[in-house]
Image (spheres, rainbow, N blue to C red):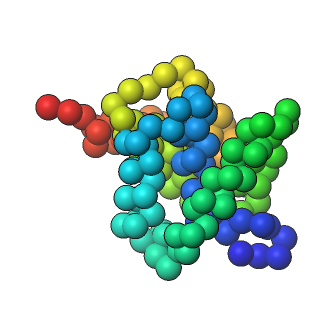
Amino acid sequence: MSESSPMSPQDALIAVMVACSASDENMRTAELVAIQRMVNHMPVFAGYDLDRIRRISQIVFDLFEEEDGLDALFGLIRDALPERLNETAYALACDVVTADGKHNEVELRMLEEVREELSIDRLHAAAIEWGARVRHMTP
């Protein structure tokens, strides 16, 4: 973490995932399990202090209660996240939203916000979304 940002890059990734899961005010077990699985297994989270997940989640929840909280949250995320991890953040968000096999308009709108705020190229976003969809297909 730098002194200028209260979040590390990994914190920012957690914040994106939690925000997408909580966007519909219903954090499903499958979404929480997906977040935990990704934090435990992905190289980008190597050495990450798992105790920070609760703290970062609370920041997201608190900001969701404020009038301009979403803008503030995206400001924190952009400040902490190196541009090279923007597509990683979007991919993680897509995996969380698709983890329970259901999409609702609120979650899809949140993914669109993430895509816009992190300046994800539309073609890259489509490929990331397709990858998330096929990873979470059921028989």
Quadrant including the C terminus = top left
Instruction: Indicate the position of residue 22 as horizontal and vertical percent values.
Output: 58, 38
Q: Is residue 106 above or below residue 85?
A: above
Residue plotted at (57% across, 70% down): 51
Residue plotted at (69% across, 48% down): 60
Instruction: Indicate the position of residue 58 as horizontal and vertical percent values.
Output: 68, 52
Quadrant including the N terminus = bottom right
Q: Is residue 63 above or below residue 8?
A: above
- In this orientation, which residue lies closer to the viewer: 135 or 48? 48
Q: Would you say residue 34 is visible in this rendering?
A: yes
Instruction: Indicate the position of residue 91 as horizontal and vertical percent values.
Output: 46, 48
The count of marks equals: 0
Tell me: 136 left or right of 29: left
Q: Is residue 100 above or below residue 87?
A: above
Residue plotted at (40% across, 42% down): 29
Q: Quadrant of the rendered structure where residue 85 is?
A: bottom right
The residue positioned farthest toward the top in the image shown: 105
